[in-house]
Image (cartoon, coloured by chain):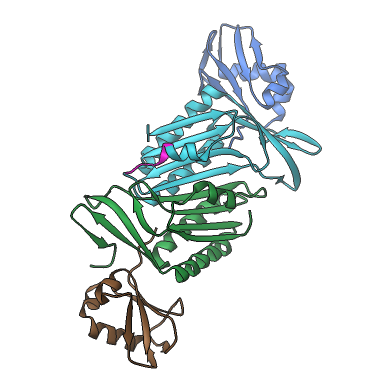
Chain colours: A cyan, B blue, C green, D brown
């Protein structure tokens, strides 16, 4: 494990192994990973792919804040947050979060906190492409 | 002149990655008023935050020319 | 995804990628993985390695029950439970649990339920080797 | 004859993977009594479960010769 926090945004496919190798720690017994993948249907419509737009420097800052908060709140050792940008196909990975802790309860709580907070605060926008059009998720009433 | 980065639906509304406001100094609240007046469509979305120098800003915060300003429509990462 | 439940006990290293490939599903948006690794210290003593003994046919049955219960209780789509047997070194993976669900809250809850229950019911025994001896974990007062 | 698989600390106590009880039919409770009498060390550990045909058994359950029986000391997987 190189550092306590890794945050990363990439146009290329995310590697679970890379995230895992950065998260595993010989002083810790548990790693909780959340992997968000692209569903083929949403609200009854067929989805063809997503496109993620990112305000990258601010997004990385906000991801770092989430990791710091998770470490402080739950006493975990390590938090990694990796997010895709650009075109992401069905079944592909949009986000990976890894939390490492000495005991396992904390890593579950911190991992869920991280993904919940990411969806509220990190400046990343998802455009969902359906067979008959596309829209920015959550933008309109 | 204040330059405003626009993302997601904001980029579509402004039809550009960048909007401009003729001012050297303006509060976030006044920037919202100006943007909503220039582009009515901003009043029809689920609101937006304003970021100044890559941090979420409150309505009373003052923006100076040269600050990095961005319109942050509802985020939807993950 | 080949089936709703995968349970597996192996003397060889566990592959996160293999577990992930069996868990990912295009109708689902979230996968929660728990990876249990071997810590280098326990109760203030240095651990050199573990040795897992398994009552394999019964352990697989109990693992399958946990997966079925998790699917029923939390409405998740898929549960994989992989466990090592034999010699497991420091930092190596002892257990991987993967839970796939349409929405993310359920996969966290079900994954935590699965590891908590595994530690209570599955007939697998851990012998911890320290520098100055070894003992069966949890066996004695 | 009833054969009893022994795991973990039970294997160490019995000093074998298999214990034997001279009986064709016995309750789980009586099997416990017999084992605890034959091997006092069983009374010094954190208890154990008995599995019959790969399922956890209750004390009143009857074991027949030919059943697969196992002593399950406190598990510690994961």
Q: Where is residue B25 in the image (x, y as percent from the top left)?
A: 55, 9
Range shown magenta = A22-26
Q: Does the magenta stretch include residue C59?
A: no
User: Is residue A97 positioned above or below B56 on the image?
Assistant: below
Q: Position of residue B19 (x, y in %)?
A: 66, 14
Quarter of the image where one finds residue C137: bottom left
- Specify whether residue A33 is in view: yes
Residue at the extreme bottom: D24
Q: Which of A101 and C88 is in front in this view?
A: C88
Q: Position of residue C18 (x, y in %)?
A: 54, 50
The mark tally for this picture is 0
Q: Is residue A105 left or right of residue B32?
A: left
Q: Nearer the viewer, residue C19 or A109?
A: C19
- Specify whether residue D46 is in view: no
Residue at the extreme left: C132
User: Is residue C57 positioned above or below D52 on the image?
Assistant: above
For the point 75% across and 48% down, which residue is it? A44
- Specify the quadrant that holds the C terminus of chain B: top right
For the point 52% across and 12% down, which residue is it? B67
- Specify the quadrant that holds the N terminus of chain B: top right
Q: Is residue B61 left or right of residue C124?
A: right
Q: Nearer the viewer, residue B10 or A71?
A: A71
Q: Which of B65 and B25 is in front in this view?
A: B65
For the point 70% across and 16% down, which residue is it? B16
Q: Where is residue C106 in the image (x, y as percent from the top left)?
A: 55, 54
């Amino acid at each position: 494990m190189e550092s306590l926090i890794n945050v990363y945004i990439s146009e290329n496919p995310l590697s679970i192994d890379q995230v895992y190798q950065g998260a595993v720690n010989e002083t810790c017994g548990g790693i909780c990973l959340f992997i968000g993948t692209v569903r083929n249907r949403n609200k009854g419509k067929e989805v063809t792919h997503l496109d993620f737009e990112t305000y990258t420097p601010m997004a990385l800052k906000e991801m770092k804040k989430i990791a710091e908060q998770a470490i402080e709140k739950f006493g975990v050792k390590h938090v990694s947050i990796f997010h895709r940008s650009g075109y992401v196909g069905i079944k592909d990975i949009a986000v990976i979060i890894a939390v490492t802790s000495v005991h396992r309860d904390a890593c579950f709580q911190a991992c869920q906190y991280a993904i919940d907070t990411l969806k509220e605060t990190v400046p990343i926008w998802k455009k969902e492409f359906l067979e008959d059009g596309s829209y920015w998720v959550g933008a309109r009433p | 002149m204040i330059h405003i980065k626009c993302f997601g639906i904001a980029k579509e509304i402004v039809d550009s990655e960048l909007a401009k406001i003729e001012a050297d100094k303006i509060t976030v609240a006044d920037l919202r008023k100006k943007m909503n007046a220039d582009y009515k469509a901003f009043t029809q979305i689920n609101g937006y935050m304003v970021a100044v120098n890559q941090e979420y800003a409150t309505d009373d915060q003052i923006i100076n020319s040269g600050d990095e300003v961005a319109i942050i429509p509802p985020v939807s990462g993950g």
